[in-house]
Structures are given as C-alpha cells and as structure tokens.
Image (cartoon, rainbow, N blue to C red):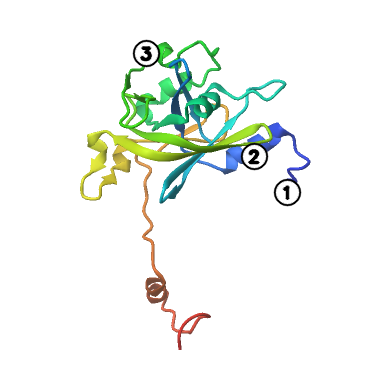
C-alpha cells in the first residue's frame, strides 16, 4: 500500500511515522524557565546525529489548538539555551509517563512525581536523580518548520551511574541498563531487557572471505 503524504491528514501521517520509525529512544528532558521553575517532559522524536561535536536532535511539536505556541520545553530551551536529556529505563518508565501529562505551565512535573534532582556538571538545569544517565546540552539552534520545532543541542557533559559503565572503554553496559523505547502511539513501549542480539560488522576483506568471493568486483584493484 502506498501513501502520498500530501493527501493524508496530519493524524494519519503521525500514525504511519510512529509505527515505522521505531523503536525510538526517549529524551526525558528537564528544562528551566527564566524564573528558575523546572519542567520535565518526554519526547521520542529524538536521536544523536553527530559525535564530533556531539549533537542531539529533538522534535518538539507546538501546543494543540490555534496559533503557534511552543510547548514549555521548547520555550524554556529557547530562553535559557540549556536542557538535560535523562535516559529512561524500566525503573523510571512509569514516572516518565506521568510527566507527559499536559499540566498547566505553573505545575512542576517533578514535584507531582516526587522525583528528586541532582545538580548538573556544566549547565544550570539539574538532572533527574533516578535516571540511569543524563546528557547535559546547550542549544545550538531551533528550527521552526510548520507546527514542529527541531532542537539541535550540543552535549557538553554526560552523567552515567557507575554500575552501567565499563571502564575499559569506557563503554555503556547497555544490556544491564534496561532502557525502554517508544513504539507507535497510545502508550506503546518496548523493553531492551533480555532482547539484545549481535551481528558482527565486517569490513570488505572479511565479507569477501566469508562469501568466498573470487571474482573481481567494480573498484577492486587488478
């Protein structure tokens, strides 16, 4: 079945993309307004898009209804240029869902969920203490496209609980962190616990050896 997105509704497009761009990592963002009030909200239009420098991208839709009004997270980032992405695992998943409620701006989601915070290393916005890891970010730019905003942030510091760090790399013990991801809409999530499998990555020479490739391919030197 083909879908011409110029002929689908916004809701239909949302349903299609949410089902196909999955599983999606969750950016559980803490931000702060100019008065110092904290906000916490999850976003699954999120990923890292570069490592030198380390860049993350987060899609934040506007508030529903007429006019173009950014959500609290987008407004806070635009005004203070700082935010923290807290990693979501099974231990904090339910609290994360509560912070997704469309509370009025004066409500502090962290107080509602009784989540404690800890000071960040380099930014003023604190991290969520219960989260297994946090990425401290400074806004590079925010692009407004239609009713969506794409926030690009540079990661300036990372906090990871000691039990999830292999000092040899350092590497993240992802099999033990038990992160959760977003699937479709309507409250659908996916676990990573006991779900890892490995397919070794090969270089060209290894691929030829594995496949018994004897013929000369385009680009090979005679």
Give the residue at mark 1.
Answer: 2
At which x and y percent is residue 25?
46, 38
Furthest-left residue in view? 167
Q: Sort mark 3 into few (<14), some (14-19) or many (20+) by Cα contacts within 10 Å.
A: few
Q: Give yes or no for contact between labels 3 and 1 (Cβ–Cβ under 8 Å).
A: no
Nearer the viewer's eye, disc 3 or disc 2?
3
Secondary element at image label 1 = loop
Which of disc 1 and disc 3 is earlier in sequence?
1
Which of disc 1 and disc 2 is earlier in sequence?
1
Give the residue at mark 3.
Answer: 114
Q: Nearer the viewer, residue 147 or 88?
A: 147
> Marks 2 and 1, how far apart in space?
11 Å
Secondary element at image label 2 = helix
Q: Residue 3 vs residue 117: left or right?
A: right
Give the residue at mark 2.
Answer: 16
> Marks 3 and 1, how far apart in space?
46 Å
At which x and y percent is residue 118?
30, 23
Which residue corresponds to the image point at 39% horizontal and 68% vertical from the top-left?
203
Q: Sort mark 1 into few (<14), some (14-19) or many (20+) by Cα contacts within 10 Å.
A: few
């Amino acid at each position: 079945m083909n879908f011409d997105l110029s002929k689908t509704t916004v809701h239909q497009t949302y349903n299609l993309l949410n089902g196909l761009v999955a599983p999606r990592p969750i950016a559980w963002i803490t931000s702060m307004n100019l008065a110092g009030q904290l906000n916490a909200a999850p976003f699954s239009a999120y990923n890292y898009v570069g490592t030198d420098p380390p860049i993350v991208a987060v899609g934040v839709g506007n508030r529903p209804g007429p006019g173009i009004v950014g959500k609290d997270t987008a407004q806070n980032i635009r005004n203070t240029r700082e935010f923290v992405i807290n990693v979501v695992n099974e231990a904090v998943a339910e609290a994360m869902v509560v912070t997704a409620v469309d509370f009025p701006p004066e409500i502090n989601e962290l107080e509602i969920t009784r989540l404690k915070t800890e000071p960040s290393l380099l930014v003023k916005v604190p991290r969520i203490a219960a989260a297994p890891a946090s990425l401290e970010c400074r806004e590079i730019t925010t692009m407004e496209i239609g009713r969506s905003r794409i926030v690009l942030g540079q990661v300036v510091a990372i906090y990871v609980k000691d039990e999830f760090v292999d000092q040899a790399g350092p590497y993240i013990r992802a099999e033990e962190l038990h992160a959760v991801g977003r699937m479709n809409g309507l409250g659908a999530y996916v676990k990573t616990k006991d779900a890892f499998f490995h397919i070794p990555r090969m270089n060209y020479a290894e691929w030829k050896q594995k496949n018994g490739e004897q013929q000369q391919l385009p680009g090979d030197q005679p």
